[in-house]
Image (cartoon, helix red, strand yellow):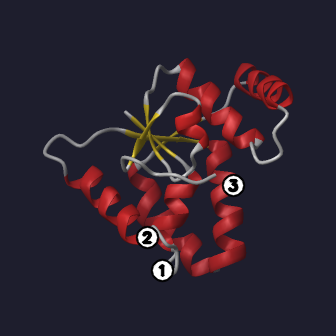
Amino acid sequence: MIFIDASALYAILDREDRVQAQARETWRSLLSAARPTALLTTNYILVESFALIQARLGLTAVRALNDAMLPVVSTCWVTEQDHTAAVSALLTQGRRRLSLVDCTSFAVMRRLNLRRAFAFDGHFAEQGFDLLPGGAEGG
């Protein structure tokens, strides 16, 4: 199972994003594998993605996300324990650019024993997760 981050969803949809070609190729690869890997995200990632994509790319892009991409992605609902752990991690880290959504993603990934994330956010690698595409950076 591969965790899907907002940074990947956004990059797939934004034609001007510097990693769009890489994002689209990774997405195609995930969907066309002989044995497709299960894809998972959280409701927090969906809220973040919808808000970011609507603000920057418009409702047509939101519709593409909702209608063309999300049907193949399962949504894991953040639990109260995930949220509490994420708030604690955020406050402990004390880093301005590390978000509550990031910390929640890490908590969910740990709870579900997920190792790989399709993301262009370097915080995933900092937390010990493997990034798809390999070497993706940022954050």
Question: Dot 3: what SS?
Answer: helix
Residue at the spot 77% in from the left edge and 25% down from the top edge: 89
Residue 69: x percent and y percent?
43, 60
Residue beneath disc 1: 15
Residue beneath disc 3: 48
* Marks 3, 1: nearer the viewer: 1
Residue at the spot 69% in from the left edge and 25% down from the top edge: 79
Identify the amino acid type marked 2.
Gln
In the figure, residue 104 lies in which quadrant?
top right
Label 1, residues with CA under 10 Å away: few <14, some 14-19, many ≥20: few
Label 2, residues with CA under 10 Å away: few <14, some 14-19, many ≥20: some
Identify the amino acid type marked 1.
Arg
Residue 29: x percent and y percent?
25, 55
Between 92 and 65, the one nearer to me in the picture: 92
Residue at the spot 77% in from the left edge and 48% down from the top edge: 97
* 38 horizontally vs 99: left or right: left
Label placed on residue 20 = 2
